[in-house]
Image (tube, rainbow, N blue to C red):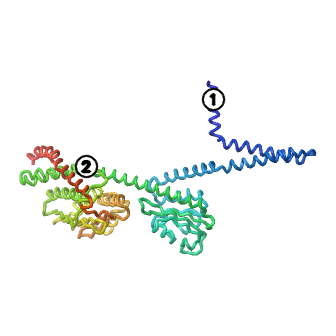
Amino acid sequence: MAEILKNYRDAEYAQKRFPRSFTLEMLTFTVSALAALAMIWMLFSPQVSIPAVVIAGVVFTLSIVIVIRLVMDPDSVRAHQSEEVLVVASCMLGYMKDGMNQQAAQQICNLLLPSTSAIAVSITDCEKVLGYTGVEAFENPVGGPIRTSATYDAIEEGETYVLYTAEEIGFPDTKTQVNAAIIVPLKVGGAVDGTLKFYYRSGKKITETQKSIAEGFGLMLSSQMAAAEYEEQRKLATAMELKMLQSQINPHFLFNTINTIASLIRTNPAKARVLLRDFAVFYRSTLEDSSDRILLERELQQTQRYFSFEVARFGEDRLELKVNQTDDFSSMMVPPFIVQPIAENAVKHAMPSEGKLTVSISAQIDGDDVIVVVEDDGVGMSQEACESIMHPESSTGLGIAVKNVHDRMKGFFGPDASMQVDSQLGEGTRVTLRFPGCAQRASQSQGAEDALEAMVQKDRAGEDVLRRPLELALEDIAPAL
């Protein structure tokens, strides 16, 4: 039994090391070589046997035909091509673990060039070259602007361009080794984020196979860019959930609010009761707002609740909130925690040492878009600080909240979503949020009205659940005040 298993393992190893097609090719090649030697020997032999020469010739011809058939077997060719594509795709996935940046783009260009008949491969975003390898690399430096008009056309139209002359490509200079090109747009979420370009010395090099290879690689890159963006959104969501959790247990905000309510119990019991109710609803809503989108009206209500605590703490002579809502937003959906962080930053960073800080929040419909503006008349900031707060390297204070909101808007609503920050020292700051294609009237979505009513009822039910423990805590705190 052991001998049988050993023979089986040896046979299995031999099959893995020498595939059946390989051994058959070697056997047929050996037969054809022997037949050729036999023909030569018989032709120069003193006693020539015509039938033997004919038989040897037939065997040689058949052997050659079989060898050619095995080498050119479509299944073998397809298997080899599939293996190459899988290797390239695996390497591309490893290069793009941090998204499509210049380093990843350059590595991918180096990887793709040997897989095609092109003389150069380039990857761009919508403005500049991210990666380039091949001829004329000096004229197309990484980080430099896009030089060809056809690239801008492909970005604008979102279609693959196959160009057979240098004039069609649109290089700014006439002397170039590139005389043909395939330009494939890279799309993420329906929007063009860049291009993958293959340059050729002659239009004759562009075959149907080259077109398929270019479009296939373009599709793979687009898919991996979308996956990288999804992963980035997941990280942002995780970071935002962590920030929300930290906000929920922020000891300064928690104890300041509780102390404020406790001090009002004796001086203004009615106001203390209102704040206590809002405090219960605020924290319960913060705990539960983990879905992808919530009603804008709910987000504004949550922001107003936050301000009610800060106004009670600092006093109405130091802080004021104005909300101007000219249109009906009962069915408008936004990501949670999208307006409140901007308003919080106004309180934390814009309040002057003396005088009153007024924060205004306005929302209006502009065509198919919804615009939300958060404005204050506080200390403001310099132009340099204003330009840097949404920079990728911004990682502290105001920059974290603003950049996080901006990135999540782009992730939810696409590239047309925007955040504009305008500020002047001593005059205040204005943050404008534009949500594209989100203007919906209440009459267009009865389901949203039902959802809002359910949320209101849930808020009222939650008040009693959280209010009693807080009342007990305040009873313990009040005597010590």
Name the image quarter holding the N terminus. Answer: top right
x, y percent for residue 316: 13, 62
Q: Whole-percent x and y of residue 462?
A: 18, 47
Mark sitting on residue 258: none
Q: Secondary structure at mark 2?
A: helix
Residue 288 badge: 2
**Residue under numbered circle 1:** 6
Q: Give percent across and percent down for residue 99.
A: 44, 56
Q: Is residue 48 left or right of residue 88?
A: right
Residue drawn at (45%, 68%) of the image: 156
Crowdedness of circle 1 by 10 Å Cα count: few (<14), some, many (20+)? few
| Rendered image quadrant of residue 313 | bottom left
The local secondary structure at tag 1 comes to helix
Residue 161 appears anywhere in the view: yes
The answer to whether 123 appears left or right of 289 in the picture is right
Q: Amino acid at mark 2?
A: Glu
Which residue of the protein is positioned furthest toward the top in this rendering? 1
**Relative to 82, residue 372 above or below:** below
Tag 1: residue type? Lys
Residue 352 visible in rendering: no
Residue 334, position as x, y percentages in the image: 29, 58
